[in-house]
Amino acid sequence: MLSVPRHALTLFIAILIWLFSSLASADVPWLSAETMRSDAARIGRLLYRAPSAERDAAIDARLARLHGTWEAGLKAAYKDTAEPVTTALEALDTAARAGDAEETARVREILWTRLLHGAQRQAFSALERGDTSASDEWLNIREYARASGDTAAELAMAELLAGRLEASEALPIVRRELLGIHAAELRLSLARATQDAEAQHYVQLAGELGRAEGLMTILRESLEDKLGVEVMRRLDADLATAREARTAAAIAPVRAALTDYAPVALSDAERLRRARLLRRFLDLVGIEYQDGVRNGEISIPMEYHEAVLFRSRAAMIFGDLRPGLTEIAPDAAERLATLLNEMDTHITAKDEPQQIQALIREALELIDQVFGSETAQGGYELAVETLPAVLDEMLLMARSGDWKEAEMKRLEAYSWFDPDIEQRLIPRAPGQALRLEARFWEGSVALPGLAGIIAAEGPIDALADQVAAIEEGLIDARKRIETPLSTLGALVQSGGIILREGLEAVLILAALMGALRAEGVPSSAWRRPVVSGVVLAIAGSFALWFAARQLITISTLQREMLEGATALVAAAVLIWVTRNLLSRAQGGHFERLRSTLRQSSLSATGIFALAFFVVFREGFETVLFYEALLVDAPSGAVLAGLALGGAGALLIGWLVFGLGLRLPLKSFFRITGVLLAVLSVMLVGAGVRGLQTAALLPATPVDWFPDWEWLQLWIGLFPVAEALAAQGAVIAFYLLNLLLGRRAGAT
């Protein structure tokens, strides 16, 4: 067999890639840069495998693609900024071929930061000469704010492209934002490096220190200006020492030197926005951690990891605020830093949630004292600012191959969407809210949702398309939410909420009471359990709403779980009642239920449970909808709509109830039984859907069932396999029960 030298084969592959890449064109540099970043990350992951010919061949192929991508036009596009990238690429090649995982991780991050640096310089150069389109292309090779939600650079570029802003005006805005992002990323890398050193994760440590090294190069001019040339030299030496020592103690001097570093001063508006974000993330730490840890053990991994994530985001925000805060309130700045560090220690040790909560309460009080009570306001405003940035970062995580982190970012994005945006949108456009929610989860067969794409680890193009669709949908959602409601509009939307949410409960109770009364069951046997269930459910809905606002914290996923579980419990009770209603055995349509009612309190308890759960399921969510609607709608019109919509639902219920007195008994039972059966199928669909959006059940979209909003809103039929299967099982149960009842009657 002919033997081909490994390096010769690699060179051949590189030439092929270069040829194909040249044909494809290099007019879009950011695509090539992202390809290089992805291939470099893949090489790093390959080095975690045991040495083998297969692994080495895969590394060779990725290296060949890296060189091919760089040489096929991107190198020429970088012009005078290409040499540092070429040097880093050669260093990566050497480290990867030697199987040195730590050095590969370090140089991989340096390669990316040099790509960033070169792209930034090209963008600034294009802006200086007025080449708008070129600067816009180069600015696609950048990092995005992880937590502060900066959008000034993007808005400035949009205005520039539209001809409403001069390039000389856009340049300082873009430079300011990028400097702030790089400074935040530098602090984050050093914080992560400290954690990796303590955990003895040396490959990750090398990568974070390499990233810090590259970011310091990008920030060098600013660092020297703010800290001085001598301090910068000491920083370089300390960072080199940290690479050699690989200990947290060796990293500490670098972090300390950067404590009060701020490349740009924050405006009052930016400071308030970051303070609000800091407060929000600390709140989220408490919410997620209390459910994620029990008795020193992780009870729900997702909740625990989200608590870690949100504390990390809080630390990043505080890093932006600390320089300015030190000038006006040095004691508060020092105490907040201590509290954040203590939270990290307790979270790592998996200490009891009460310890974390005490630290969070103190931190929130300090934030309110220093920045004012306004920091506790603005949930919706924060969400619309932050959500697009979180989605962009999720996409970056996926492109780098970090799918686990991408899933964490997806959940973080969903926590901003619901309740802050979705709850404001549902009263105005419930169908649009459903579509947007589905995009975060299962999506559709044509375009899978974020959850499905991330679980399957690709494809990236589909993920990017879904992110673009969500961001486009959010723009339209903001228009709907922020358009002031007229009196008539508020009245119609208010009436629609109570009619949509309350009709299901009214129909179930009316049909049940009509059946009981028509069969001759005395009203004293069912009036008390029905009234008690309804009153307690309404009181419970308001109590839970008040508790969620004042006493306890309910996360997005917990609320979805509560709604889903309540719907399924109500469905179970309704199925049991309906089975009795439809049964022809043991003396007629309803004799068994009537007999049980007369002889014991068992069925009275069942009727109470049904009344409670069908009302409670809708009650809490309905209260949230009206709270959202009253934010900017005329209160008088909202109350009038509530009264009219409620009256309409009660009227329909009264008509159904009246059938029990006017129709022949046999016909009435057929109508009522079918109605209750349909409503139980609706409840099952809503319950399964709730557990899916609580991430407790999988969701598989189907293309053979219509994706119609009215089916989902009014009938509870979703084009999702699991929900449809559960509803199909309920229908099959009813048909089987009916068949067996007929056979029993025939004998």
Image (cartoon, rainbow, N blue to C red):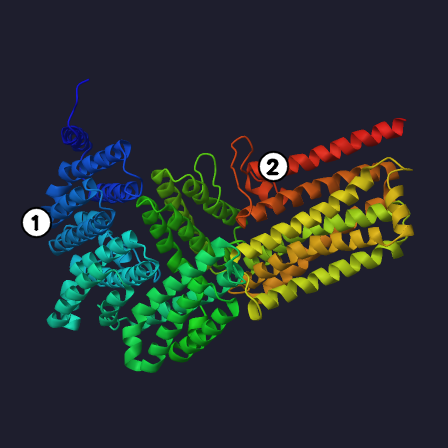
Task: Find out whether the residues at labels 2 and 1 contact each other: C-beta distance under 8 Å.
Answer: no
**Is disc 1 placed on a helix, strand or loop?**
helix
Name the residue carrying label 1: 80
Name the residue carrying label 2: 724
Q: Amino acid at mark 2?
A: Leu
Q: Amino acid at mark 1?
A: Asp
Occupied quadrant, residue 194: bottom left
Nearest the viewer among 130 and 398 is 398
Q: Is residue 170 visible?
A: no
Nearest the viewer among 284 and 436 is 284
Q: Is residue 680 above or below residue 501?
A: above
Residue drawn at point x = 86 percent, y = 35 percent: 584
Q: Position of residue 440 (x, y in %)?
A: 46, 47
Left or right: 120 in relation to 375: left
Q: Is residue 70 visible?
A: yes
Occupied quadrant, residue 370: bottom left
Q: Quadrant of the N terminus?
A: top left
Occupied quadrant, residue 241: bottom left
Q: Which mark is residue 286?
A: none
